[in-house]
Image (cartoon, coloured by chain):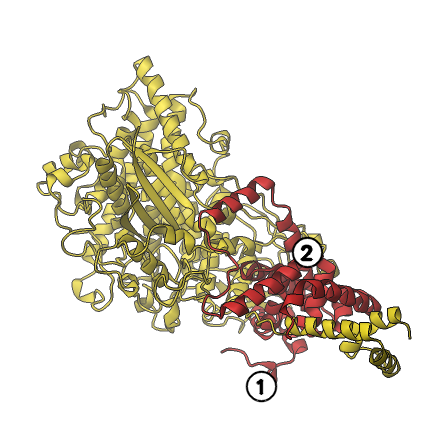
């Protein structure tokens, strides 16, 4: 055998893949040929090096993630509102259809749509015994499961019990997508109601105003379709059906981070996907939603994140640690850097605190740096567990860490820095509110998605400038004053639910960062009035709900040994008048003490006095605030409707924000000395970290 | 745990497939649990980072689920899954490869500002082991995809030539020649790591 032929066979010889005869020939040649023997040794060493590589384990919770994605796709495969079912073979009917939401709520069709979808998601969440049930042949209904049954065909079965967290998330996401898509664009989605309201005023009163966002302004959007009262009656596609291709939703105007990916439904060509051989051949064009889920960071541990934040805030670690600890997987969640240029840093800081508090963010206090201090301990099966004795509590790992988010002051290189951890929706609302604050100008040096806030600010100011020139309005602050004066933001920030509503509006100063600016609304602002009316209505409903709920929740029924603090209202020490944000001084003066203000003024000193609502506070929806008014109001109403439907007494509050964590999967970083035994930037699903830097305006 | 492993007398792959196709979506979790570790090792080496591997693995299993009815049992489920995983990995790398220069520049800038290497090894591991692993991974990454794939399947995943041929859809002779060339290329890069 020649060297060349032998060398070609050396690898196969090593692998014992040669026939006995060929192997013998190689062996003989190698014994005689030093060059081939040397090559064989090298190849053997190469294989040895490769063999010594450590094995890479599968990502934690991969099976659960896959299961969730499967459930999600099955849900997405069901036709949306107004869509004709493509495969009318299977039927499912949630219980709530028997008790239509419209009758209970008695509000506009837009609200009904959201409420209907919300109840659907609500019923599907863990802990509810009123989950969707199937219309199936007798005997096909399985308690605790969702059956999707086709005549003569096997049922597609959701193990709702075992996969309830995933199912819940899937339903939540479906809810959001339904909202966005059914309204022909996410700028019609409820979580952006406030932004829409603001822009609506701007558009109508100043048609010549430049667009803050092309997508937002160009999408007038057709009228909302009829409320999906029979949403759940729409038959979900069978497992074999491919999700209907949905148009990718445009970016909402103040969507921060990567939420657009969650809204976008990008599905591949069903034909391509259905061809298994093509998939196996690598020709599939499929790009599933799971790719976006990875961005959302489903497998992080809130404890370590909070510990890291605490370390940063206490000076034990520089802010850069947040970035250093970031892995590519978390990159998009951590990179949100919001730079604010303020005429007065102190005033800006106070206003920021106001906004944080208004959004239900919990201040992390010094001396509470233990991650566990911030863990939200909730009943294992969630807030509704008491309603449903039949529901076995979820795994403990899935039971903790729920809150609207956290904020913490830090200081670095002469800048005031706020580290905020919250969910994307909350962040979007925060951005909307931030755009209204005169004294908080978002710098163009902020991270890319956050610059949209600046665009909106520019738009608002340009509009105000035009109005001032035309003598139409009261100059800068018109819209802010007009909208904020009637919105739930102010009343909820003030922690005076009883004073919300029109009466309160007459006496309370409108929220603004700088009340010295003219606040009087122009005489004629029909659009603004409409916004006012809507918001007043929402605020009234919210507050009424809140009062009712508070009354129905005796203190004895509150969980005693958990970190849940009923945050309605938030009774906090009144800050000194000089420490109060500008906007709140008048309010405090009117109310006497500013009780329940919820603002822990002072920077960078963390919240003084008693813990301003326990870390890990779970805010009730209605007590939460402001910018969230519309969306939260709807959720409250959905809950109320659900409560009425079930004839239950009450339940112990509403949780929102991120889904249960309980997943590890921490990415390792280069610095293990950072904090404790876990070192990633662990986030709960849908959570983001926002670093706000307050700079002196030049 | 809901499911039993195959080794403990659980259902066979074909039985699981039948259940899933028959509508028991939850049964697919058994498939994932059964094969995730084996796939993860190969996929991680193919795509070069654990973060990307997570995406690819999830994508792989979703594709498998969606196309499970097309699995006829002609090959093992393992081989079939691997075929999807390999192609998904390659597709993922190709997509990643076409990142616009501006974005790539941004990544570089971030890296310069202190972003951790996403595939940074565990600092608790001995430095030498980490360096070796990183060097080997770089060598693998430097291979073109067909050579990288075959060497991963053989020398990391320990598939035999027939399985590799089935996974890649190429004749065994092609596997043999590709593998030999891949090893020759790796030999040059890994020689400093050879044991004395």
Chain identifier matching the red colour in the rendered picture: B
Residue A384 drawn at (x, y percent): 33, 64
Residue B16 drawn at (x, y percent): 63, 75
In screen coordinates, is A470 left or right of A585?
A: right
Considering depth in this image, is A596 or A28 the residue closer to the camera?
Answer: A28
Q: Residue furthest bottom?
A: B9
Which residue is tagged 1?
Answer: B8
Residue A273 is marked as: 2
Q: Bin the neighbour count of mark 1 within 10 Å (Cα to Cα): few under 14, some 14-19, many 20 and up.
A: few
Residue A630 in sight from this viewpoint:
no
Residue B44 in sight from this viewpoint:
yes
Of all chains, the one bearing label 2 is: A
Q: What residue appears at the point 57 percent right and 39 percent down from the top-left corner? A: B102
Residue B4 drawn at (x, y percent): 55, 81
Q: Residue furthest left?
A: A592
- Mark 2 to mark 1 CA distance (whole Å): 34 Å
Give the quarter of the figure containing the C terminus of chain A: top left
Residue A342 drawn at (x, y percent): 28, 33
SS for dot 1: helix
Q: What residue appears at the point 32 percent right and 14 percent down from the top-left corner? A: A469
In screen coordinates, is A143 left or right of B146?
A: left
SS for dot 2: helix
Q: Colour of chain A?
A: yellow
In the figure, B58 relative to A439: above or below? below
């Amino acid at each position: 055998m020649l060297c060349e032929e032998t060398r070609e066979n050396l690898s196969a010889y090593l692998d014992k893949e040669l026939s006995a005869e060929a192997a013998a020939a190689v062996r003989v040649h190698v014994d005689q040929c030093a060059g081939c023997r040397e090559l064989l040794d090298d190849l053997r060493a190469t294989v040895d090096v490769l063999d010594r590589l450590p094995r890479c384990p599968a990502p934690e919770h991969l099976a659960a993630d896959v299961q969730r994605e499967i459930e999600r796709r099955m849900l997405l495969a069901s036709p949306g509102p107004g869509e004709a079912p493509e495969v009318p073979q299977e039927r499912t009917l949630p219980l709530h259809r028997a008790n239509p939401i419209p009758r209970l709520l008695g509000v506009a069709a837009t609200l009904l749509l959201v409420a209907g979808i919300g109840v659907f998601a609500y019923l599907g969440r863990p802990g509810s015994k009123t989950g969707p049930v199937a219309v199936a042949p007798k005997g096909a209904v399985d308690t605790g499961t969702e059956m999707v049954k086709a005549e003569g065909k096997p049922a597609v079965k959701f193990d709702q019990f075992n996969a309830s967290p995933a199912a819940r998330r899937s339903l939540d996401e479906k809810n959001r997508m339904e909202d966005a898509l059914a309204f022909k664009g996410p700028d019609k989605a409820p979580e952006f109601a406030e932004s829409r309201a603001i822009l609506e005023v701007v558009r109508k009163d100043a048609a010549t105003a430049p667009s803050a966002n092309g997508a937002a302004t160009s999408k007038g959007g057709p009228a909302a379709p009829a409320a999906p009262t029979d949403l759940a009656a729409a038959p979900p596609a069978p497992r074999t059906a491919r999700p209907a291709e949905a148009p990718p939703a445009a970016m909402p105007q103040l969507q921060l981070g990567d939420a657009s990916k969650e809204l976008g439904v990008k599905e591949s060509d069903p034909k391509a996907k259905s061809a298994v051989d093509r998939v196996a051949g690598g020709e599939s064009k499929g790009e599933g939603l799971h790719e976006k889920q990875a961005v959302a960071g489903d497998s992080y541990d809130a404890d370590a994140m909070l510990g890291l934040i605490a370390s940063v805030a206490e000076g034990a670690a520089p802010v850069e640690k947040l970035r250093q600890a970031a892995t590519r997987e978390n990159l998009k969640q951590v990179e949100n850097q919001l730079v604010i240029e303020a005429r007065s840093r102190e005033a800006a800081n106070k206003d920021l605190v106001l906004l944080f508090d208004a959004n239900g963010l919990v201040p992390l206090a010094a001396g509470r740096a233990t991650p566990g201090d911030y863990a939200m301990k909730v009943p294992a099966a969630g807030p509704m567990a008491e309603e449903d004795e039949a529901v076995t509590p979820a795994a403990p790992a899935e039971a903790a860490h729920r809150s609207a988010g956290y904020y913490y002051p830090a200081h670095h290189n002469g800048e005031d820095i706020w580290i905020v951890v919250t969910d994307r929706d909350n962040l979007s609302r925060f951005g909307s509110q931030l755009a209204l604050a005169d004294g908080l100008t978002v710098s163009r040096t902020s991270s890319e998605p956050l610059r949209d806030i600046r665009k909106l600010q520019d738009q608002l100011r340009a509009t105000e400038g035009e109005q001032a020139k035309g003598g139409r309005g009261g100059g800068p602050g018109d819209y802010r004053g007009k909208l904020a004066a009637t919105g739930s933001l102010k009343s909820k920030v003030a922690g005076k639910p009883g004073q919300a509503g029109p009466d309160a509006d007459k006496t309370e100063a409108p929220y603004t960062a700088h009340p010295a600016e003219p606040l009087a609304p122009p005489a004629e602002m029909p659009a603004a009035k409409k916004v006012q009316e809507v918001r007043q209505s929402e605020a009234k409903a919210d507050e009424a709900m809140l009062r009712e709920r508070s009354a129905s929740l005796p203190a004895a029924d509150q969980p005693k040994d958990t970190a849940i603090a009923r945050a309605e209202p938030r009774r906090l020490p009144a800050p000194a008048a000089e420490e109060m944000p500008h906007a709140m001084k008048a309010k405090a003066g009117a109310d006497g003490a500013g009780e329940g203000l919820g603002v822990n003024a002072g920077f960078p000193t963390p919240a003084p006095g008693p813990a301003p609502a326990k870390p890990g506070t779970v805010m009730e929806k209605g007590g939460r605030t402001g910018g969230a008014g519309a969306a939260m109001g709807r959720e409250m109403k959905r809950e109320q409707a659900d409560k009425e439907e079930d004839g239950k007494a009450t339940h112990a509050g509403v949780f929102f924000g991120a889904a249960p964590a309980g997943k590890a999967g921490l990415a390792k970083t280069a610095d293990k000395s950072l904090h404790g035994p876990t070192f990633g930037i662990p986030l709960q699903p849908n959570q983001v970290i926002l670093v706000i830097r307050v700079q002196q305006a030049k | 745990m809901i499911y039993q492993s195959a080794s403990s007398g659980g259902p066979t792959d074909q039985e699981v497939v039948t259940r899933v196709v028959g509508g028991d979506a939850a049964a697919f979790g058994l498939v994932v649990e059964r094969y995730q570790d084996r796939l993860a090792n190969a996929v991680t080496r193919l795509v070069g980072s654990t973060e990307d591997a997570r995406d690819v693995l999830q994508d792989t299993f979703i594709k498998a689920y969606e196309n499970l009815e097309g699995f006829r049992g002609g090959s093992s489920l393992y081989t079939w899954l691997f075929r999807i995983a390999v192609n998904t990995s390659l597709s993922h790398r190709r997509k990643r490869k076409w990142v616009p220069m501006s974005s790539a520049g941004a990544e570089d800038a971030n890296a310069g500002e202190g972003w951790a290497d996403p595939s940074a090894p565990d600092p608790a591991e001995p430095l030498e082991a980490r360096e070796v692993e990183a060097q080997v991974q770089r060598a693998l990454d430097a291979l073109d995809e067909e050579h990288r794939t075959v060497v991963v399947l053989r020398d990391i995943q320990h598939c035999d030539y027939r399985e590799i041929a089935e996974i890649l859809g190429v004749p065994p002779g092609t596997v043999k020649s590709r593998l030999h060339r891949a090893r020759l290329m790796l030999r040059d890069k890994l020689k400093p790591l050879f044991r004395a």
